[in-house]
Image (cartoon, grey):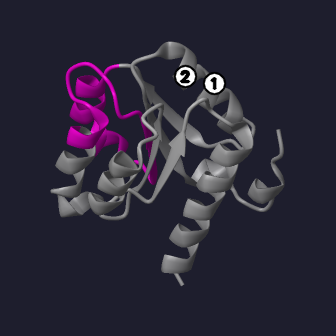
């Protein structure tokens, strides 16, 4: 895995929430990101993640689209309705790769969309880009 894009980033300053109903996917994302010392909050239950969202207050949300209960689109729609979370950068990580769904994600406030199978370099690049945007907004 290439971590060059994360060099110079103090990951401990950033909280990333990962929400996917498949533990293998959350574990893979955790493995990809743990080297950068991010504060990772992992949920395999979207309702539980939503219930804890205010407490976690993540800088970045990595979320699947297709999940039982609350799907990723409904989840993001709910957090985007609360302006306390306007700062949260949203990255969908999903097997749904149709352009209509990707467009829908963008229209609802997603900042990026990564298609599965999960590609470590793509995840790192997307997270690094979102952190750069967060940093730039603080200037």
| Occupied quadrant, residue 106 | bottom left
Q: What residue is disc 2 on?
A: 25
Query: Is the C terminus in the top left, top right, bottom left or bottom right quadrant?
Result: bottom right
Q: Nearer the viewer, residue 28 or 8?
A: 28
Q: Nearer the viewer, residue 75 or 73?
A: 73
Query: Crowding near pointer 2: few (<14 within 10 Å), some, many (20+)?
Result: some
Secondary structure category for the residue under label 2:
helix
The magenta stretch spans residue 36: no
Label 2 – label 1 distance at C-alpha: 5 Å
Q: Are marks 2 and 1 in contact (CB under 8 Å)?
A: yes
Residue at image coords 67%, 47%:
122
- Find residue 45 and report its horizontal and vertical position in percent: 32, 20
Can you see residue 28? yes
Number of the label disc, if any, that sits on residue 28: 1
Query: Is the N terminus in the top left, top right, bottom left or bottom right quadrant?
Result: top right
Residue at image coords 71%, 59%:
9
- Find residue 54 and report its horizontal and vertical position in percent: 26, 44
In the rendered image, the vertical position of residue 16 relative to residue 45, given as above or below: below
Q: Nearer the viewer, residue 103 or 92?
A: 103
In the rendered image, the vertical position of residue 94 relative to residue 78, given as above or below: above
């Amino acid at each position: 895995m290439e971590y060059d894009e994360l060099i110079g980033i103090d990951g401990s300053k950033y909280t990333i929430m990962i929400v996917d109903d498949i533990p293998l996917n959350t574990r893979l994302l955790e493995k990809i990101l743990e080297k950068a010392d991010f504060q990772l909050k992992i949920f395999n239950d979207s309702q539980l993640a939503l219930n804890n969202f205010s407490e976690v207050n993540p800088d970045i949300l990595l979320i699947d689209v297709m999940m039982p209960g609350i799907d990723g689109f409904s989840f993001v729609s709910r957090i985007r309705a609360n302006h306390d979370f306007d700062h949260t950068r949203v990255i969908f990580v999903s097997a749904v790769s149709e352009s209509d769904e990707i467009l829908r994600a963008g229209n609802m406030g997603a900042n990026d969309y990564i298609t599965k199978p999960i590609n470590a370099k793509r995840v790192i690049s997307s997270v690094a880009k979102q952190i750069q945007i967060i940093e730039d907004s603080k200037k």
